[in-house]
Image (spheres, rainbow, N blue to C red):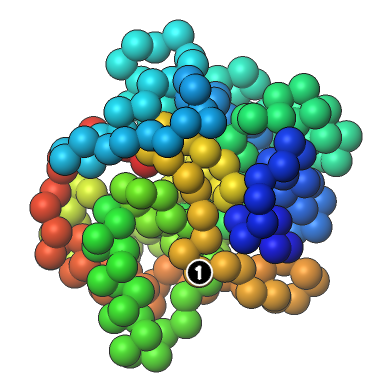
Amino acid sequence: MREILGRRRMTRWALRNAALVYATRWGWPVVPGVPPRNSTRRTTVRRSGQPTGRCSCPRPDCVVPGAHPFDPELLAATTDERMVRWWWTNRSDAPVLLATGGRAPCAVSLPAAAGARALEEFDRLGLRTGPVVATPTRFALLVAPYDLQELGELLYAQDWVPSSLRFHGEGGYVPLPPSRIGAGEVRWERPPSAGNGGAPWLPRMEPLADVLVRASAQVPDTGSRLAY
């Protein structure tokens, strides 16, 4: 667990070991991401919030360098131990991507500054959060699975939802620690806590939505350009 939380020096097999825990112990479907170029070097971030690191995929204008699946595609995400072990044995530097939705966790992500404000507000209100993934540019809160109807009802109840607040359900993905992507290191801002059956406990999104919308509205909106 400590290695997954990023508290120990990265070893060659740290990503593979983490992916195996996510897939086989927690039942989270994972798939390798595309490593950023020179992924061992520190990546800087522009004032706009966009990472300056480049992706090793063929797209020169990739907006999520090192934080997206390519080959295999997202649909290949699995919890199968043999497949996960083979992938990261052959690609030891590949980021670990969680395929969200279905029976897997969903997520809601927002700019890092807004995420920090939201966590402070949750603490003040006594609202429990689940695992929170952080990069230098964004926070992603993992939540219990939700469907499009539930998401639509939550958003309809809001006067306005900033485009910087993004929802990762069926067909989505988020990078997991201890990956390194174009924006930099992926870490746990709030590590997972044990739940029933060994998988981490996840909150429902409904009680968190109002705070997340307010926090996102209080920081500059960088527009619809997706970046981690």
Identify the residue shown where x is 66% and y is 56%. Answer: 8
Identify the residue shown where x is 61% and y is 18%. Answer: 71
* Residue farthest along the right direction in this orientation: 82
Residue assigned mark 1: 190
Disc 1 residue crowd, few under 14, some 14–19, many 20+, Cα 10 Å? some
> In the figure, is residue 139 to the left or right of 114?
right
> In the figure, is residue 195 to the left or right of 183?
right
**Residue 41, position in %: x, y?**
47, 31
**Residue 146, position in %: x, y?**
49, 59
> In the figure, is residue 140 to the left or right of 1?
left
From this view, report whether residue 53 is shown above or below residue 44: above
From this view, report whether residue 27 is shown above or below residue 14: below
Identify the residue shown where x is 16% and y is 40%. Answer: 47
Where is residue 42, by image quadrant? top left
Disc 1 residue type? Arg
**Residue 124, position in %: x, y?**
31, 89
**Residue 168, position in %: x, y?**
44, 48
Can you see residue 90?
A: yes
Q: Is mark 1 on a helix, strand or loop?
A: strand
Can you see residue 171?
A: no
> In the figure, is residue 85 to the left or right of 107?
right
Q: Quadrant where the N terminus lies?
A: bottom right
Q: Nearer the viewer, residue 4 or 27?
A: 4
From this view, report whether residue 107 is shown above or below residue 202: above
From this view, report whether residue 33 is shown above or below residue 219: above
Where is residue 91, by image quadrant? top right
Identify the residue shown where x is 48% and y is 15%. Answer: 57
Q: Quadrant where the C terminus lies?
A: top left
